[in-house]
Amino acid sequence: MDAFSLVPPLWTEAAVHARGFQCPTCAKSPREAKQVWLNRRSPVYTDDGRKYQEFYQCDCTTVWWAWSTDRPKPDCSSD
């Protein structure tokens, strides 16, 4: 599976919108997802720029999506 394919995989059809940037069922991080697909064909343009839907298939079988702009900023602080 190519995360950047222009054709959506069938598993994305059952996706639910996650309000936080994690699985809405088990709260796992998207880094733990079994599969990922980025919907680059349909960007949404806002005053702040462009955003995309990111789809994730979790180990718990939940398929969820969130906006790319909802992704938390990386913590780059060093201790």
Image (tube, rainbow, N blue to C red):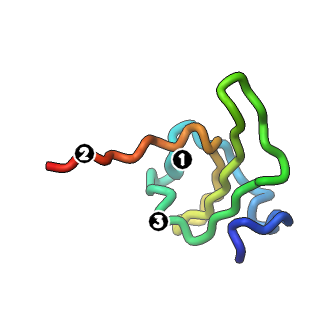
Extreme residue in the top direction: 47
Question: Upstream in the sequence, badge 2 or badge 1?
Answer: 1
Compare marks 2 and 3 and give the one earlier in the sequence: 3
Q: Which residue is rendered at x = 73% and y = 27% of the image? A: 46
Q: x, y (%) of residue 18? A: 59, 43
Spatial distance from mark 2 to mark 1, Cα to Cα?
28 Å
Amino acid type indicated by mark 3: Glu
Which residue is tagged 3?
32
Q: In terms of depth relative to the viewer, which is nearer, 67 or 13? A: 67
Q: Position of residue 55 (x, y in %)?
A: 67, 56
Indicate which disc, 3 or 1, sits on the residue closer to the N terminus: 1
Residue of label 1: 24
| Residue that numbered label 2 is attached to | 77
User: Amino acid type of disc 2?
Assistant: Ser
Say left or right for 36 vs 76: right
Quarter of the figure with residue 9 = bottom right
For residue 50, above or below residue 24: above
Gap in angstroms between the C-alphas marked 2 and 3: 22 Å
Q: Which quadrant of the structure image shows residue 61?
A: bottom right
